[in-house]
Amino acid sequence: MKIESHSINQIRIAEIIADEIIIHSAADGLNILGDIYYQGFDSVIVYEKNITPDFFQLANGMAGEALQKFSNYRVRLAIVGDFGVPPSKSLKQFIFESNKTGHINFVSSLNEAILKLTT
């Protein structure tokens, strides 16, 4: 895992880059949050491919638990992936509501993530 730093409009964004799944559980998400929080980042970008598919099965509570931590610490998050056709109605609604508040964002590209996290 590597952290690529972006600084735009005095906002520090940590882009998490990895070749494998790095978030297998809510605890893994919390570890990443803690790491970037203590390094002074305001926001974080994570790629869907680096998150276990179980995360997107809302019934198990993993997404809610992990994302609540980002809200509690006031660290904005963008998850970059293909969310055009979510596999379930509940995930589609979850993505819609998350994107509406702007604290947790599901986006399709790095550029879109940076734009969301800096406005």
Image (cartoon, grey):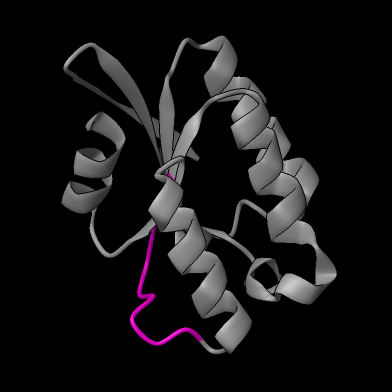
Residue 11 on the magenta segment: no
Q: Give the answer, above or below, for where 108 lies relative to 88.
A: above
Residue at image position (69%, 35%) is 69
- Nearest the viewer among 57 and 91 is 91
- Nearest the viewer among 94 and 84 is 94
Specify whether residue 17 is in view.
no
Q: In this view, does 25 lie to the left or right of 85?
A: right
What kind of secondary structure does the magenta stretch mostly adopt? loop
Can you give x and y, in whole percent of width and height, for residue 83 in the image? 39, 75
Residue at image position (40%, 56%) is 99
Can you give x and y, in whole percent of width and height, for residue 4 in the image? 32, 31
Residue 82 on the magenta segment: yes
- Nearest the viewer among 100 and 44 is 100
Q: In this view, does 110 lie to the left or right of 83?
A: left
Q: Residue 55 falls in which quadrant of the image?
A: bottom right
Q: Give the range drawn in magenta.
A: 78-86
Can you give x and y, in whole percent of width and height, for residue 70 in the image? 61, 35
